[in-house]
């Protein structure tokens, strides 16, 4: 079974070793320790997968505690139906949050478009006034 160093994982997933240690501090990752005093972290394939899922969850907007719960849920000997029901609940809450954010974004974008239109109108009006002044001077 392959193993990875913290540097290898950091490079592969384009994160810092500090970020990986941060996930360890939150109990998401649990590398094996080797070397004098256990100073060297060794990540088996399972931990690599957990890091990959963590980063995917972060991109999707899940909190670290939600990510940990979801990952842990599939490593426990719990009933599959209960796991799926819980996962569906988390997904529904996340969907609702994203829908609210989308509504906010759409409103904000509409306001920006209105401001842009107003600026263009004022700029076009200023150009017309400038052209009229130039014609009066030339006459």
Image: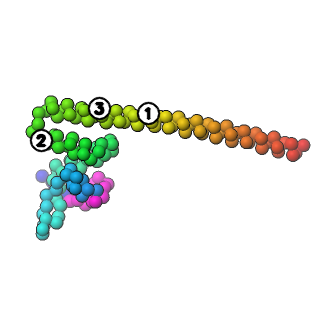
Q: Is residue 8 visible?
A: no
Q: Which element carries disc 2, helix, strand or loop?
A: loop
Q: Is residue 80 visible?
A: yes
Q: Is residue 43 left or right of residue 104?
A: left
Earlier in the chain: of badge 1 and badge 3, it is 3
Disc 1 to disc 2, C-alpha distance: 37 Å
Magenta extent? 5-18
For the C terminus, the quadrant is top right
Q: Which element carries disc 1, helix, strand or loop?
A: helix
- Circle 3/circle 2 CB separation < 8 Å: no
Q: Position of residue 11 (x, y in %)?
A: 29, 57
Residue located beneath label 1 in the image? 103
Q: Quadrant of residue 76?
A: top left
Earlier in the chain: of badge 3 and badge 2, it is 2
Q: Position of residue 37 (x, y in %)?
A: 12, 68
Whether residue 120 is situated above or below residue 45 in the rendered picture: above
Q: Quadrant of residue 16?
A: bottom left
Residue located beneath label 3 in the image? 92
Residue located beneath label 2 in the image? 76
- Magenta stretch contains residue 17: yes
Disc 1 to disc 3, C-alpha distance: 17 Å
Residue at image position (24%, 32%) is 88
Disc 3 to disc 2, C-alpha distance: 22 Å
Report the predominant secondary structure element of the magenta stretch: helix
Q: Is residue 61 left or right of residue 52?
A: right
């Amino acid at each position: 079974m392959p193993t990875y160093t913290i540097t290898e994982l950091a490079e592969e997933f384009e994160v810092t070793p500090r970020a990986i240690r941060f996930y360890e501090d939150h109990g998401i990752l649990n590398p094996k320790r080797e070397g004098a005093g256990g100073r060297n972290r060794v990540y088996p394939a399972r931990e690599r997968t957990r890091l990959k899922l963590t980063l995917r969850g972060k991109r999707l907007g899940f909190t670290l505690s939600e990510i940990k719960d979801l990952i842990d849920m599939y490593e426990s000997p719990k009933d599959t139906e209960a796991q799926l029901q819980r996962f569906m609940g988390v997904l529904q809450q996340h969907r609702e949050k994203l829908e609210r954010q989308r509504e906010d974004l759409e409103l904000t974008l509409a306001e920006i478009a209105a401001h842009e239109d107003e600026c263009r109108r004022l700029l076009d009006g200023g150009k017309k006034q400038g052209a009229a002044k130039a014609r009066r001077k030339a006459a």
